[in-house]
Amino acid sequence: MICSNETYYMASQPGILTDWPWKPLGSFKYVLMAPWVVQTIIYCVTASHERDLAYCLILPMLMARLVHNQIWISVSRHRSAQGKSRIIDRGLEFSQVDRESNWDDYILLTGHIMCLAYTMLPEVASHLPVWRADGVVLVALLHAGPVEFLYYWFHRALHHHFLYSRYHSHHHSSIVTQPITAVAHPFAEVLAYVALFAIPQFATLFTKTASIASVYGYLFYIDFMNNLGHCNFELFPKKLFSLFPFLKYLAYTPSFHSLHHTKFRTNYSLFMPIYDYIYGTVDDSTDETYEMSLKRPKDSPDVVHLTHLTTPYSIYHLPLGFASLASNPQTAKWYLRFMWPFTFGFIATGWIFGRTFVSERNTFSKLNLQSWVVPRFTKQYLKGQSTSVNKLIEEAILEAESSAAKVLSLGLLNQQEELNGNGQLYIHKFPELKIKVIDGSSLAAAIAVNSIPESTSQVLLRGKFNKVSLAISIALTKRNVQVAILNKDEMTKLHSRLKAKVDLTLTATFDAKIWLVGDGWDENEQMRAAKGSIFIPFSQFPPKKMRKDCFYHYTPAMIAPSSFTNTHSCENWLPRRAMSAWRIAGIVHALEGWNVHECGSTTFNITQIWHATIRHGFQPLEFDIPF
C-alpha cells in the first residue's frame, strides 16, 4: 500500500478559465456538436463525389473514444475490487466521482477542434490517405522529442505553488487514480495539453504526410496511455522488461505514475519516463512499488454481499458501469434507451457465459467486504427460472467459502422464500458449510419498527406475509401498537404463521396514518389512503409512489459510518452512503462473531441486532416525518 504524508485538495484559488465554457449546459453540452453532426451526416450521405473518409470518421471516432474510456473505467474498477495487482488501497469517495464526472469534456473539445481543422484547412486536412509511413514516423519522433520534453517541464511548472494552487491541484485531489482521472483538469490546463498534442498533428498536416493512421492513431495512443497510467492496477509483466530493458524509458507503468499522485514531486513524465531519468526526478521506490504491485494477489473477503441486477439498464448503474449514474440513486434515464445494442450484448453474454462477478469492495473495522452480482434480472427471478438462479447462488456461496469468507448475505431476491426458502435450501444441501448465510430479515424488521413514530397506536399491514412482516408484528405488539388487517383470510393466514400472540384487528377502512407495505400488495390502494399517510416498506423493492400528498420511507436501510471506506456508489435506489438492511446484517453478523445462519424460519432478537448495529456506527436513515 502506498500512502502520502501530504493531502492535496482542489484548487483553493481557481485561476482564469478554470471552468469549461459549456459547464452551465450540463448534459446538454452535447447539443453543441449538433451542427457538426448534421453537417457530417448530410455530407456523408449526399456526397456525389469521392467521400472524405477522414472527415466521415470524426464522429465514429468520438464515439469509439467514449467506449474505449468506459471499458478502461469498468476494467479498472473490477480489478481494483478484486485486489489483484492493485497499487493503492485507499478507496474512492463521492467527492472524487463528482469532480471527475466531466471526463467526456476533453473528447468533446477535441471533436470541435477536428471539425474546425477540416473546415478551416481543407487544402491540408481533407482526403487524407489511410496510411503513410513517413507521417506515422514523424508523429512518433515529434511526440518522443518536443511533446514529451515540453510536457515534462510544463508539468514541473504546474507544481509551482502559483500554478498548482490555481490549476493543477484539481487533478491531484485524486490520490487514488482511476482512468478518467487522467482528464480531470481545469479548462485552461487542458488547452495547454491540446496545444502540445497538436504539434505532431499539425506538423504532418503542413508537411502533407498526415494520414488517417497518424491522426486517429495518435489520439488512440494518447487515450490508451492516459487510461493505463491512471488505472490503479499493474499490468506490465516483469518478463516484458527483462526481454526489452530499454522499454522502461519509453513507456511508463501504472505504478510509475501512481507514485506521482502519492509522492507529488517525482515521476513527472507524460508517457515516457526517460526525462525523469535524465533530470533525476525518478522516485526511489519506483521499482519496488512495481514489483510489489505485480505480486499482489486477489483480496480474500471476510464478508460477501450477494445481489443481482434489477432492470436491464441497471448494468449502467453498477460501480462497474457509468460512474456518474452509480454515484446517485438509481432512476430511469431516457438516454439509456439508445444504449440498447450494448444492453442486449450484456444480457446475452450474462445469459450464455454469466457467472457471479465482483462489483465493489469496501473495508470496515478490519473487515474486507465485497459485493458480488448475479447476472440475472428481477424478471428472471419472478418468471420460473429458479433452477438456473439457484445454481448461480450456490456457486457463489461455494466460491465465498473457498475464499475463506466468514459471512455471505443474500440481497434482493436472492433470499426470496419462493426461490430458496430464505436461503434454507443451501444450508440443507451443504450442511458442512463454514461460511454463515444471512438473509437479513431480523435487521430489516428492526429498521421498519424503529421507523414508526413513538406515538403510533395502529398500523395498517399490507403485502405478502413473510418472516419480516411476522417479526414486525410481534415487535409492534410488544410496543402496544395494534396491527390492522383488511380481510379475515389475511388475518387467518397471518395467525397461522405466528407462534406468538399478536394484537391483530380487522379493519374495513384505510384511515391508518402508518402503512407497512411489502411485496405483492395492490398498490392502487394508495389512492384510498388518508392525506398525509406514511408508507414504510419492509420489502427489498420500494413501492410505486402514486400520491404527492403522502410520504414514502426508504426500503429498510441505514447510513454507513464515516470509517466505511471506498464508498463511491449508491446501492440501487438508496441515497449516498445508505446501505440496505440485508447488506448491513452480514457485516454486523461478522463483527459480532455470531456462529449461526439466519435462514429459513430463523430470526434474531430484533432489539439485540438493532443495538448491535447502532453500536458499530450505523445510523438510522433520516426521514422527515410530518408529525
Image: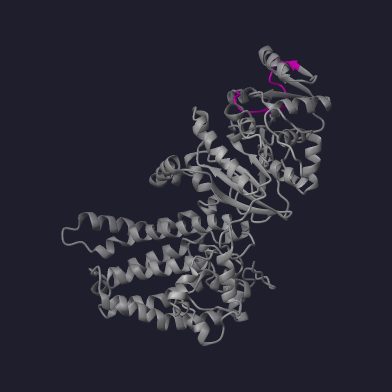
* Residue sticking out furthest to the front: 432
Q: Where is 545 relative to 82, above or below?
A: above
| Residue 153 visible from this viewpoint | no
* Whole-percent x, y for residue 417 in the image: 62, 28
The residue nearer to you, when weighing 108 against 211, is 211
* Residue sticking out furthest to the top: 488
Image quarter of residue 416: top right
Image quarter of residue 520: top right
Magenta stretch, main secondary structure, is loop
Report the quarter where the N terminus lies: bottom right
Asked whether residue 501 is drawn in magenta, I would say: no
Q: Is residue 125 left or right of residue 551?
A: left
Residue depicted at 59% across the width and 23% down the height = 522
Q: Where is 108 relative to 209, above or below?
A: above
Report the quarter where the C terminus lies: top right
Q: Is residue 118 left or right of residue 63?
A: left
* Whole-percent x, y for residue 471 in the image: 74, 28
Asked whether residue 520 is drawn in magenta, I would say: yes
* Whole-percent x, y for residue 106 in the image: 45, 65
* Whole-percent x, y for residue 247 in the image: 44, 77
Q: Which residues are drawn in magenta?
A: 505-521
Residue depicted at 69% across the width and 17% down the height = 509
Q: Is residue 194 left or right of residue 82?
A: left
Q: Is residue 179 left or right of residue 338?
A: right
Residue depicted at 40% across the width and 45% down the height = 345
| Residue 419 visible from this viewpoint | yes
